[in-house]
Amino acid sequence: MSFALYGVGLLVLIGGLVYVAVLTHVASHWIVAMVIILIGAGLMAAVNNTKQRDPR
């Protein structure tokens, strides 16, 4: 899978979670914290799954 595909999926996931958090009246500082954590975790997962393997 490509890194761009992971990025698009991450943006859709974060957008959906932010929308639900706003609808349920979660405080904005918690929403920002959630977004920062999800971006970090998503980038680590995307890099880990899309890096080129070294031939043996």
Image (tube, grey):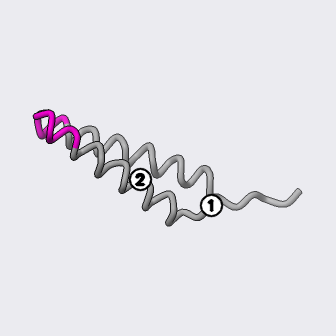
Amino acid type at image mark 2: Leu
Q: Which residues are magenta?
A: 20-30
The mark found on residue 1 in the picture is 1
Q: Position of 18 compared to 5: left or right? A: left
Q: Residue 13, percent across and down?
A: 37, 49
User: Splitting the image into 4 quarters, where does residue 41 fall?
Assistant: top left
Name the quarter where the C terminus is drawn: bottom right
Label 1 sits on a secondary structure element that is loop
The correct choice, above or below, for 1 with respect to 35 in the image is: below
Q: Residue 44, percent across and down?
A: 50, 48
Q: Which residue is mark 2?
A: 10
Residue closest to the far right: 56
Name the quarter where the N terminus is drawn: bottom right
Assess whether residue 52 is covered by the magenta stretch: no
Q: CA distance from mark 2 to mark 1?
A: 13 Å
Most common SS among magenta residues: helix
Q: Residues within 10 Å of mark 1 (few under 14, many from 20)?
A: few
What residue is shown at x 20% (from left), y 38% (from top)?
21
Amino acid type at image mark 1: Met
Q: Residue 36, percent across and down?
A: 30, 45
